[in-house]
Image: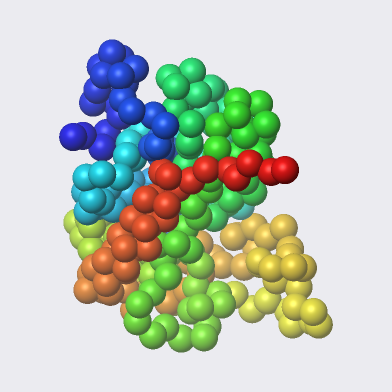
Amino acid sequence: MTRHLHHLSWTQIRDLPKNEGVVILPVGAIEQHGPHLPVWTDTLLVTEVLNQTLAALSAEVQAWALPPVTYGKSNEHTGFAGTFSLSAATLNAVLLDIAKGVAASGFRRLVFINGHGGNMAVLDAAARDIRAETGLMTFCLHPHLYVEPPFAISDNERRLGFHAGELETSLVLALTPDLVDMSQAPTHFAQFPVSAPPLFFFGAASAAWLSRDWSSTGVFGDATLGTAEKGQQLLAAAKVRLGQLIADISRFEIPTIA
Ligand SMILES: [Zn+2]
């Protein structure tokens, strides 16, 4: 059985069992990832992580992937060559249009698997609109599900290594080493001012940051620590974590309330 929905004919898709089952849409980005990684990084990672997860899934789990939405909302990287961003409104409209096709094909569940932090707010908002407008049960799986390391990293990397640092560099090294130039790999931790409560990149009090305000290379983290072996460990952990989530979502039902 294929896990790629687009490899099937329309009649095969019509005849799939759909009471259980989930359609998964990867959403990536084409944006700067420092001087050492390709701008394709987020779309590459989310697609490959999903493909490996689906390949390891047990046969009774009904889950099918769509081809990725290659571009995302990346305007936090404005000013770096090679960043090609959709606006929030465009991405939201694309997601809603695809979701309507998923609902019209008879499916009941849709998952966004997200490859890029800048997409998070758009995907969460779109998922709720889709639920309200189409009735699809809609879910968002965000990148920290697959960049959570099963090995020790520094406090700085955990707090500030969120873009093209040790973890993303390791994943690209594991998947497509020919696209990485480690001779160009930077180390950079942004000097964000400390206040109480912390006003920061993420969290309860957050700044609308732009990469160029905080990093001349576009990197946040220590990319020099990236290795293919760490990338393989990340992938192995991600496959287990995401596989379990996809299996659970494929059977998810909203309980009837009194
Ligand atoms: Zn990335």
Image side of residue 87 versus residue 17, left or right: right
Query: Seen from this angle, which residue lies furthest right?
Result: 196
Numbered circles on residues, count: 0
Q: Residue at the spot x=23%, y=50% of the render?
A: 58
Compared with residue 77, is residue 184 higher up or lower down, i.e. above or below? below
Compared with residue 216, is residue 25 higher up or lower down, i.e. above or below? above
Q: Residue at the spot x=68%, y=60% of the render?
A: 209
Image side of residue 160 versus residue 11, left or right: right
Query: Seen from this angle, which residue lies furthest top?
Result: 11
Residue 35, given in percent of the width and then of the height, sits at 39, 61
**Foreground residue among 198 and 114:** 114
Residue 137, given in percent of the width and then of the height, sits at 55, 37
Residue 254, given in percent of the width and then of the height, sits at 58, 43
Image side of residue 173 versus residue 252, left or right: left
Q: Residue at the spot x=60%, y=45% of the render?
A: 255
Instruction: Confirm whether residue 190 shows in the render.
Output: yes
- Quadrant housing the N terminus: top left
Q: Residue at the spot x=32%, y=73% of the render?
A: 226
Instruction: Confirm whether residue 170 shows in the render.
Output: no
Compared with residue 192, is residue 1 higher up or lower down, i.e. above or below? above
The quarter of the displayed image where residue 90 is located: top right
Image side of residue 69 versus residue 197, left or right: left
Residue 247, given in percent of the width and then of the height, sits at 37, 50
**Foreground residue among 64 and 98:** 64
The quarter of the displayed image where residue 199 is located: bottom right
- Quadrant housing the C terminus: top right
